[in-house]
Amino acid sequence: MYALRLAPDAGAEAFRDAAKRALAHGLKPADIAFVAHDAGILFDEVAPATLDLTVPRDFVEMMREAVCHRAEDRFALLYDVLWRLKHGEPALLSRASDPAMARLSLYVKAVRRDIHKMHAFVRFHRQDDDVYLAWFEPDHFILERATPFFAERFANMRWIIATPIGTAVWDSECLRFAAPRPKPERLEDGVLDGLWLTYYRTIFNPARLKTGAMTKEMPRRYWKNMPETAEIPKLTRDAQNRVMAMDLDPDTAPRYAQKAKPQAKPEPLPRVGLARLREEAEHCTACPLYKHATQTVFGEGPARAKFVLVGEQPGDQEDLAGKPFVGPAGQVLDRALEAAGIDRKTVYVTNAVKHFKFEPRGKRRIHAKPNAGEIKVCVGRWLKRELAAIAPDFVVALGATAAQALMGKGVTVGKLRGAALEWPDGRRGLVTVHPSYLLRLTDEEDRAAEYEKFVADLTLAAKLAAAA
């Protein structure tokens, strides 16, 4: 039996170095024990060794968050998964039923929830030297993962976030971490806290008070470090009386009680020729994505196509070629269309976003999902006008981003997939997965099954389009 020493709050880098040493010596998960630095042990320690280690990106993301959990078995579980990934189980990360993966997934969720609570519930208090001080009590070792958010949001402030697990210090230029410190005895700021309480009382809407939901999202154990919670009991007690007053006040009653009128369907956009739209789009600078992309990638297909496929955005090969769906995902789509009995030459294919968004990784350009603002700009400027020019009978959304672009709001593919629906513009359509989803599946059986479902979706879409 061998021992690997790791501090209780060891991060991803420390675990990675320890795991590389163990893997270099060929030690199985059952052969090692992870122990604290100061633990008295009877096992041999693992000698230093070097190893080039390449692991899936999904494992790296899971590791970075799972190591922040307080559970004592997290290092052992991560090493177990890592060992199996390197010794013949490449599909392990997608196997949710595996006990180790299931437990690590729970740890990741708990850490993410803890980070979210820290972002939401940290309250700064100005000190005499114009340094802002906050105290927070996290459940897990999340300080280094959570505090870059504050450095970006409050970049011009000098602040300190003290916690029982460590201290984060931002001097308006550099974020550094120090040892834990006790909770400050005085955390009051008469001016800043007073302004915040006034604002909180003003925005409190008694007509929408749901105590259960409020305490679920803002658990009471956080209240002691949040100045506004002192106002909650009084605001809650007075809520019913304030609602009655709003009902009787002619100035507030309409805004409080009147139901929203159903919105009429938008007027159809004027049709502009595709050639003209494509030429205009070549020079689009409506959002920052054009700065790094090679070129605009406009849609392609018959100008009067009755069947349109909308994807998310061009990929690396599409960006270079200037045409949609010519890379690996496009090849999957071509095979699926043929299997569904659809001639691609009769179909118009396009994307919700016309420029390639990516993150550089060495010489590679890794796909990055467009945000809601980028989607909204591109849909309003190009996709809606593109569809107006084609006037198709049927529109298929390939993936969540395309569905969001066509629906005008965030949607879940799993809830809408494979069912006929009507888009807000009145056109009929269907939602299915993006072909790149199939490429990300590592298990061959899963990939084959999902491919058959994808072909079935396209086959159904073709039948519905023919009947439109």
Image (cartoon, rainbow, N blue to C red):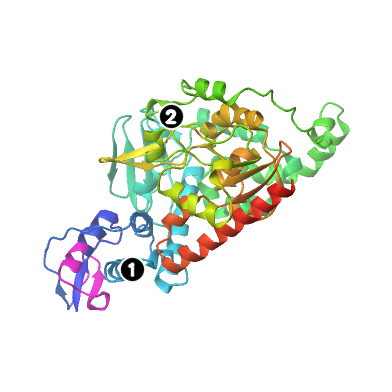
Closer to the camera, 1 or 261? 261
Asked which quadrant contains residue 230, the reply is: top right
10 Å crowding of disc 2: few (<14), some (14-19), many (20+): many
Q: Position of residue 91 (x, y in %)?
A: 38, 66
Q: Position of residue 29 (x, y in %)?
A: 27, 74
Q: Is residue 11 visible?
A: no
Residue visible at 72% across and 45% down?
209
Q: Quadrant of residue 455?
A: bottom right
Q: Position of residue 161 (x, y in %)?
A: 38, 42
* Residue position for label 1: 81
Element at badge 1?
helix
Q: Quadrant of the N terminus?
A: bottom left
**Magenta stretch contains residue 33:** yes
Q: Disc 2 residue type?
A: Leu
**Quarter of the image with the C terminus in it:** top right
Q: Which residue is mark 2?
A: 289
Q: Where does the magenta region start and end? A: 20-40
**At 33% across and 55% down in the image, what residue appears?**
60
Say if 265 sits above or below 25 in the image. Answer: above
Residue 207 colored in magenta in the image: no
Which of the pair 418/99 is nearer the observer? 418
